[in-house]
Amino acid sequence: MYTFSAHICAKLPTFAPNPVNPVPPMSYLTDKSDALQQAAALLHEKGLHPAAAHPAYYCCYQLMMHIWLHSMKKTPEELTRRRNPHEALIAEIGGRIEKSAGKDSAANFRAFYRKIWELKELRISADYSNAPFDVKKSARALRLSSVITSILKKY
């Protein structure tokens, strides 16, 4: 059995505070998103397929939070007051994509909305279901995450 070890962690970026300017000009959320996407790929490569779905989903969640905080200028408290913060965030970000003026906004909205819900279901299945989560599902989670993050980075 393969164990999660230090050599996997050594490949991930570190997040040390900047002593000269302790307040980041942007959020750490985009860096965390990148790290989670790398972690998902490493877990998949090592055959830890159920574990790969979790960071694949949360790398998208981190980017959605970045948009919520920095582009939409909303607070974390505004989100946590919602009945289901994950679903509310997906709906709000989807609405932002749908209403944007870009020529591909309608197609991006449809792709984002369909794929984020599929990825969320895969993550829930991997985390909570008493069913196998195989290499195909893990690879699907990674592909979905990649497409979703490329859409989110446009907004």
Image (cartoon, rainbow, N blue to C red):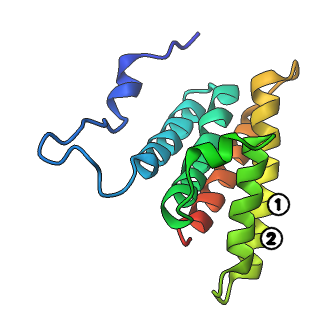
Considering depth in this image, is 5 or 37 the residue closer to the camera?
A: 37
Q: Is residue 4 left or right of residue 139?
A: left
CB under 8 Å between callouts 1 and 2? yes
Q: Tag 1: residue type?
A: Arg
Residue at the spot of label 2: 110
Q: Secondary structure at mark 2?
A: helix
Seen at 48% across and 42% down, the residue is: 38
Q: CA distance from mark 1 to mark 2?
A: 6 Å
Q: Residue at x 88, y 22 (%)?
A: 131
Residue ranking furthest to the left? 20
Q: Secondary structure at mark 1?
A: helix
User: Which x, y percent locates residue 145?
Assistant: 64, 51
Q: On the image, which quarter does residue 18 sit in?
A: top left
Q: 73 left or right of 134? A: left
Is 88 situated above or below 124? below
Quarter assignment of residue 20: top left
Mark 2 residue type: Arg
Quadrant occupied by the C terminus = bottom right
Q: Is residue 114 above or below residue 32?
A: below
Horizontally, residue 90 falls left or right of residue 30, namely right
User: Residue 6: x percent and y percent?
Assistant: 36, 18
When the figure is inspected, residue 27 is found, relative to residue 46, above or below; the finding is below
The mark found on residue 114 in the picture is 1
Q: Residue furthest top?
A: 1
Tell me the number on the disc at residue 6. none
Q: List x then y, in percent, for residue 95.
A: 75, 69
The 10 Å Cα crowd at callout 1, few under 14, some 14 to 19, many 20 or more, is: few
Q: Quadrant of the N terminus?
A: top right
Residue at 52% over, 44% down: 37
Residue in the foreground of this view, choosing between 75 and 130: 75
